[in-house]
Amino acid sequence: MKIQMKFITLASVLIVLTGCMEQSSKIEVVPKMEALVSVKWLMEHLDDTDLVVLDSTVVTSMSDNGNFSNVSGRADYDAGHIPSAVFADLKGNLSDPESAFEFAMPSPEQFAEAIGALGVGSDSRVVIYSAKNEVWAARMWWMLRWAGFDQVALLDGGLKAWTDAGGTLSTENSKIVAKKFVFNLREGVIADRDEVFSAISNDQVTIADALPEAHYTGKFSLYSRPGHIQSAVNMPSSNYSESGFYVSNDELDLLFEGDRSKRVITYCGGGIAASSLAFNLVRGGYNDVAIYAGSLEEWAINPENPMSIENP
């Protein structure tokens, strides 16, 4: 009788365990997003219920006197966007409206509210693209990284790659179901003026200028003073994409040299091209990368901040 009871008990345990195994096997594990996704990938996953596609277009134009201006890409979005994409306004509520600088980082609370209103929650996956220049999508990617959100990728080649591959465009506003976005600050990915100032004399930190070489050497200047932050090296962000597509990981290994464990702080004029460079540094294996959000907009107006037109 005891042997029989043990057998019945063991059988019951096996039934319960088998049921648990069957139940757990049905749980779908969402794979980690790669930093870049292809148009083919997006076409295959566009209808996934957890996927949010963000159009982060900003339009830059140059006036007759050589000055640049940026306007929201909302009109471009309205004229035609990837179906289901929602518009992320980097000129609007995704920047600090109280700042004197054009693309100043918003507060964590403002960012969480704005991104949640676009349908991004903690259980979402996100793909970002831009219609004009991939640096705007990289800026949005970096802001989500700052917020501790990792299930995010850029659409390689942006909107042009989508249409070139036969992807259709929509002129309808996509339906948005707002979600609660939990901001989980990732320390160290945004640098301020004081950290950059200290890094000038710290050989364990590299300051990287993402602007063109001619701007770096002071041949022309878009900001209060010509040249670059003292001790900075020139790593133009435009050198790291070809025909709208980012270079491969193998090519990044050849482009980037040095100790990948050292801290790198990127900057440009307003923290936009710096985000694209930072994005590629992370792809290239650097694990301690920040952008100086204020960049030359903030740095150049203060004469106490040293600048140079010489190569270090």
Image (cartoon, rainbow, N blue to C red):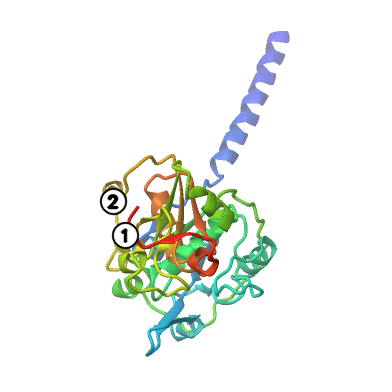
Outermost residue toward the bottom in this view: 64
Q: Is residue 189 visible?
A: no
Q: How many marks?
A: 2
Residue 167, percent from left and from top: 35, 74
Q: Above or below — where is 240 with respect to 172?
A: above
Task: Identify the residue at image location x=64%, y=52%.
Answer: 184
Locate residue 158: give its quadrant. bottom left
Amino acid residing under circle 2:
Leu
Residue carrying label 1 = 240
Residue 253 horizontal/vertical position (percent): 30, 46
Between 194 and 57, the one nearer to me in the picture: 194
Residue at numbered disc 2: 255
Q: Nearer the viewer, residue 56 or 30?
A: 56
Q: Is residue 253 above or below residue 180?
A: above
Q: Position of residue 206 (x, y in %)?
A: 43, 48
Using the rendered image of the protein, determine whether residue 271 is visible from the camera's viewpoint: yes
Residue 219 or 212: which is nearer the viewer? 219
